[in-house]
Image: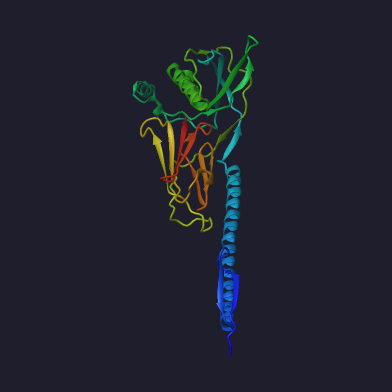
Amino acid sequence: MLNTHVKITLPLIACPRRSVSISCCKHAVCFYIYLFSSCKRVVMETDASLLGVELEQKQQEELYQQLLLQTMGKMQNDSPPSKVIRPQPGMCVKTSSVSDKQKVFLNICQSQAVPPPPHLSQEALVKLLESEDPTSYRVPMSLGEPHTEVDNSSQGCTVYDVVINDEFFQKCQKDTLFQQFLIAVSLEGLENKYNLELSRDIKILKNRKFMGSVAEQNIRTKSKPIIQEIDSKEPHSLPSSIKCPEFTLLVEPPSGNAEYLIAEILLPGVISARSVVLDLGEDRLVLIARPALFHLDIFFPLLIDQENSVAQYNTKTQMLTVTMPVVS
């Protein structure tokens, strides 16, 4: 019986840009049909795999967005416990800004809500002022936002409200050395917080306890722990796919008055800074990074200057470094 050969040219399913040419008899045609069916099954399996990857990426994106919304809401709702106080007038100090020679007034006020500093005798204060680091003694105070007032000459001036403990204020009123010390730390506190340079040529107004009006202030009622340790190996309430990165907090300089707080955060697998969302509060850092979905939420032992903080991400070491000026 004469065998009839047929030449068939069809695209190869597994390789769209290639074609296969088969010269065969009827049995060969049957073999090709079997090969075609097998390739079709391979394509179906590949499509399912791609769909699985797309589904996983979509789930990760939804999880990332959900975590981002939860974290931002937590930043707003989980603020440190605080209360609004209306301080009592104390004394008014006149000074000026070094840069433009404009008049500046300090309303040094008093309130029971502000905790007192540690007990300090006059002898201890003298030794402190003569020491190499007089800033080691801290006076708790609340520094208000600047507000504009009109002085006795009908000229505009800038006023800052400083609130301290009422008992410590009375102590300073009875002792000139303590009074001068209080004014010095108040000026330094305002300079550090608002990036100012104020003159030390001051005048205490005798017949005026405050300039303008004394505004209410929102003070924290509970202090944060000095150090908060987080062990990334411990279980968290977050989903298992979210990891807490390794991090280190450093104080610069290591001794004396802290000027900078530096956070070093290791983010393996994060190839670009665009994948990182960083939010800084006055004493808090919240970070979310993908694709590995890192999540970090820590409190600081010190208050920081958010606006002048700088973050840098090294793509080689995959280390995020956040440098934050400390506000006294």
10 above or below 84? below
Residue 165 seen in render: no
Name the spot of residue 221 as percent of width and height, x first.
54, 38
| Up/down of 122 relative to 325, above or below | above
Question: Which residue lies at the image location 46% right of the left edge and 32% below the top edge?
Answer: 326
Residue 248 found in image quarter: top left
Across and down, in percent, residue 148 comes to 63, 20
Q: Position of residue 295 (x, y in %)?
A: 51, 50
Who's the residue at 59% across and 14% down the image? 208
The colour scheme applied to this rendered structure is: rainbow
Q: Quadrant of the rendered structure where residue 113 is? A: top right
Q: Indicate the quadrant containing the N terminus: top left, top right, bottom left or bottom right.
A: bottom right
State whether residue 262 is above or below residue 131: below
Res. 50 in view: yes
Tell me: 207 left or right of 232: right
User: Is the residue 117 above or below the residue 176 in the image?
Assistant: below
The one nearer the camera, 175 or 188, is: 188
Q: Identify the residue shown where x is 48% and y is 12%.
A: 201
